[in-house]
Amino acid sequence: MKPNIKIPDFSNTAIVDQVGVEERASRFTKRSIKNETKMNGLLLALNMIDLTTLEGKDTVGKVKQLCTKAVHLHEAYPGLPTVAAVCVYPSMVGVAKKALGDSGVKVASVSTAFPSGQAPTQVKIDDTKYAVENGADEIDMVISRGKFLQGEYNFVFDEIALIKETCGDARLKVILETGELGTYDRVRKASDIAMYAGADFIKTSTGKISPAATMPVTLVMLEAIRDFYYKTGKKIAMKPAGGISKAKLALHYLVMLNEVLGEDWMNNEWFRFGASSLANDLLMQIMKQKTGIYQSSNYFSID
Amino acid sequence: MAKDDKKDNTLKLKFDSARNLAPAPESKSIAKIKPQYELFINGSFVKPESGKYFDTINPATEEKLSQVAEASPADVDKAIKSARSAYQKVWSKMPGKERAKYIFRISRMIQEKAREFAVVESLDGGKPIRESRDFDIPTAANHFFYYAGWADKLNYAFPTKTPRPVGVASQIIPWNFPLLMAAWKIAPALATGNTVVLKSAETTPLTALMLAELIQEADLPPGVVNIITGAGETGAAMVSHPDTDKIAFTGSTDVGKIIQKAVASTHKKVTLELGGKAANIIFDDAPLDQAVEGVINGIFFNQGHVCCAGSRLYVQESVYDIVLRKLKDRLETLIVGDPLDKNTDIGAINSRGQLETIQKYLKIGVQEGGEIHQSSCPLPKKGFFCSPTLFTNVSQSSRIAQEEIFGPVLSILTFRTEDEVIEKANNTPYGLSAGVWTDKGSKIFNMTTKLRAGVVWANTFNKFDPTSPFGGFKESGFGREGGLHGLMPYLHLD
């Protein structure tokens, strides 16, 4: 953390009006995205994906296949971008790292006893250390929601700061699990705590809890990022995850990003979609834009 | 580290790409505008006695859309006579539940033709299609729907009273919400058993004339609704006609005063809905991002051509810097352009005359020492357009803080305490609306009891519903439209 960033009093974080934020979020969906703007948006969204597999039944074979998909999204359309990263459990980081090689696609690993985060801090540090040592470029940690809801904000803050230290050069994504926080006010507070504690990204959800990412929740977090930027001059990245499986919804998110944080955030260094099935819908729409007709889902690989 | 590193200009958010979207125009072809429109009197379209017509143009392109008849005093007389006859022979005798059927029918037909109405509204008036499609037309239909429900329940609306219709109503509407204002006027009048002569505004007659066609198609008895077009002279004839019983006017305070003088010492009932200079108040404990959004919508909705627009912003000094910064960034994301493009946030100014008025006030604001801040969004080369504008360094004594501009211009002032802002907010000849932004419920109730305004919104702005009464204090007028209160001006209650 930069020494010039002053830690604020988190009992005093900005408040959020539920009705207002939901109204504003729905306004972005009224934008009509056509032609070249649409094509650019689809390609950009593709390039922002953290292609994810986080299952108990993940195997070496599954992860390898996913990595191939990450680099070769749809060979029928030459020149497509790759996704941004592949996101796996720590045990699969080595496999993914090897499979992705020098493709430029990053390896992200969940850690800190994902998805519940209900483990001693030392276990979380070890979990993270293991992922980083195996070559993870990015760490997706979960916050201790239990402690947060108990009001132990210092605990949550310190834990994030410790994990950030453990990350070394790896970028840290902090998952708030907004579906368990309950109100926009708490989402805002958790966002502030994460950013001031050293998060490089703030991320909505694990994908294991419903609701996962929604537009209003993402808007609250984007506004928190904007306020943090106003105050400190430091850019923080955003990652909505879970529940974004359609191209149209992804475009709505990009409209929102563009209108809240502006074009400096419109790339995969500063914005990601945590998703598994979004890629194929984007590919289908991209082919539709290119050829004028929808193709059967059978033409798009499922990995 | 050098101090300069912390300067604002190093941290500017950029929104060019957010505004630079591929065109997404709504199709014009659905709007079937005739080359010429006549007056709708006694159930049919008749030529004006004068034989005179005037043009109505598209303010976004300055191209002529159509020409409409100019009603002379003789035409007004004809219209009022037909309304009187329909009142005496048909409408006042018809049971409420039968009247309701006609009004429900009008509502449903507006919904069926909503897209056509929306396109014509945007073509003729310059408002963005997003607003005419999502606000004007649906709300107009809702108004008819709501008042249709009251038609057979008037005795229950006013227990212990015997409600009777007043007779023939002369109704004059403005150009900012042409169809919606027609609905506000016609729906309660019909529900209560009155007949009407309605004059649309000079620059925006088309949707009212489409409504006339729709009413003809709905088979409403001839003369119950008469819709005429013309300018001030036509309106004056409607007000001074001896056989009208009720004047309903929405428009400027200046004209409102003339009307009130004209009807003094007559039997005519009057409601006036006039200008405003609403205070929108942000306290330091407000949800700031949502407040900023509300302020933006409060002033830039319909290019600021809204009588209840939140045109004076009061910000508590402790949050002034951050609010101003957020406002400026939000201003940059607004898309000014073709009203028919679905992505347009701010369309065309309604007329050349209004554009000149707004530009006059921009000059005055600068001369008075106000600091002007405008969006960098380029304006279309043709048509009447005005950049959304913020003024800071504005005082209570500045003209831009006192007079109604009726355009996309926000004057920003600061305050320190609750008492101070109440005093400042009420320090205006107007009193139509106000907005309060705070997370504290008790503060909201304190403010709403002390602000002298007909509508006070809390943590939102510019929300309209047929069930909610709307109207002014002081020089913003009197009488209420909407809700149960909106029935009263059209009834004798004894």
Image (cartoon, coloured by chain):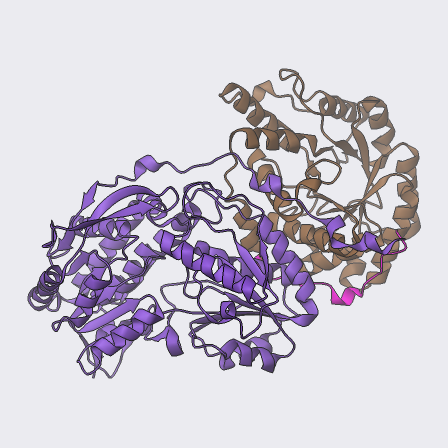
Chain colours: A brown, B purple
What span is colored magenta in the figure? Answer: A1-20
Q: Residue at x 68, y 22 (%)?
A: A73
Q: Position of residue B457 (x, y in %)?
A: 49, 69
- Quadrant position of residue A126: top right
> Horizontal and vertical percent for residue B105?
23, 53
Task: Describe residue B151's horizontal placement relative to residue A12 as left or right.
Answer: left
Q: Give the quarter of the image for residue B116.
A: top left
Residue B101: image quadrant is bottom left
Residue B298 visible here: no
Type of secondary structure dominating the magenta stretch: loop
Q: Which quadrant is the C terminus of chain B positioned in?
A: bottom left
Visible in this render: residue B98? yes
In the rendered view, tell whether residue A158 sits above or below residue B168. above
Q: Is residue B194 left or right of residue B107?
A: left
Q: Residue at x 52, y 76 (%)?
A: B425
Residue at 70% over, 56% down:
A187
Q: Nearer the viewer, residue B393 or A181?
A: B393
Tell me if residue A4 is in the magenta stretch: yes
Q: Is residue B194 left or right of A221 when viewed as pictured?
A: left
